[in-house]
Amino acid sequence: MKAWQKYFIYVSLLFLAAALYRNNYLRIPGVFSFPSLILSFLFLFAGFLGNTLSWERILRKSNVRVGFNACLAGIGLSIFGKYIPGKIWMIVGRAAYIAERGRMSLGKLSAISLNAQLITLWVGLVFGAVGVFLLGGIRLWGWLILSLWLILSLLIFSDGTHRRAERLFRKIFRRKLELPRLNFGSTLSIMPWFVLQWTLWSIGFYLLALSLHPGHIPWTAGLGFPMAGSLGIMAVITPGGLGTREAVMAGYLALADFSLAEATTIAVASRLWFLVGEVFIFLAGWTAHKIKEP
C-alpha cells in the first residue's frame, strides 16, 4: 500500500471518530427482536457488496476492465473518506485505487466514479419518492425530491449539461477534459445493480426498525433509508451526511405514524447500524487489497 493511501485511511478514521464523538451517535438502543436485528445486518452487508457490484459494472460499461477484488478494495479502503469535509474524497478514493492499480487516468476514473454516485442518488430518490407518495407526504417532500431528481436526471442523461461541464472545466483549469459518459441505453442497463443495493439496504433498514420497535411497522418505512441517505450525501456542509440524514429519516418515519421519540431513536440508531456495515466493507476491502498484493 502506498504512503498516500495509508495517510488517507488514517485521516478519514480520525474525522469519523471526531464526528461520531461530537454527535454522540454511539448510543446503543434497546432491542425488541434480535432475529430481526441479525437479519438487518445480513441485508446491510449484502447491500455493500451490491454497491461494489454496481461500481464494477459501471467501470466495465466504461471499458475499464478490473476484477471484483480491485473494486472491493477500492470501495472498502475509501469508505470512510466521506467523513472528511469536502464530499469528494470517497469518490476520488475508489477511483485513485483503480487508477494506481491499472495505470489509468485518475481524471477519467474520477468522472466515472462521480457518474456512479449520481446514479446512486437518482435511484435513491426514486425509492424515497415512492415511499413518500404511499405515506401521503407528497405535499411536504414532493417538490424537494422532484427538483433534485430532475437536476440529477440532467446531469446523468443530458448531453448539453455534459458539454457545459467540460467547457466550465476548461475555463477554470485551462485544460481540456473529455468526461466519460454512458449513453442512455448503457445507463439503463446498469441501473438494476443500483436498484439492487438500495433494495437490500431498504430491507435491512426495515428489519432494523422492526428490531427496535415493538409495534406494527409498515413496509414503506424501509424506503425512508434511500431518501434520507441520498439527501444526506447531497448535503454540502455535513461530512457523511451526519445530522442531515437522521433529521430527514426522523421526518419520514413520522409520516409512517412513529412518534417523534421513536423516529429519532431509530434514525440515530441507523447511523451506528450503517457504521457497522462500513466497518464490514472496510475490512473486506482491506482483505481484498492484501490478496491482490504480490
Image (cartoon, rainbow, N blue to C red):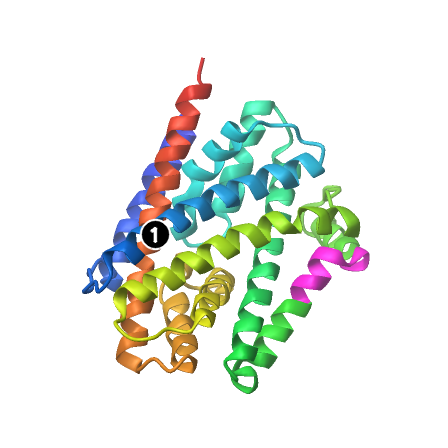
Across and down, in percent, residue 37 comes to 29, 56
Across and down, in percent, residue 110 comes to 60, 41
Q: Quadrant of the C terminus?
A: top left
Q: Is residue 53 visible?
A: yes
Return the residue nearer the eye: 133 or 279: 133
Q: Is residue 2 visible?
A: no
For label 1, the residue is: 39
Image point (33%, 66%), residue name? 209
Query: Which segment is the magenta one?
Result: 151-161
Disc 1 on helix, strand or loop?
helix
Return the residue nearer the eye: 158 or 120: 120
Indicate yes or no whether the magenta region holds residue 152.
yes
Q: Quadrant of the N terminus?
A: top left
Image point (58%, 43%), residue name? 54
Residue 274 in the image: above or below residue 140: above
Quarter where residue 48 is shown: top left
Relative placement, left or right, of 176 versus 53 is right
Indicate yes or no whether the magenta region holds residue 262.
no
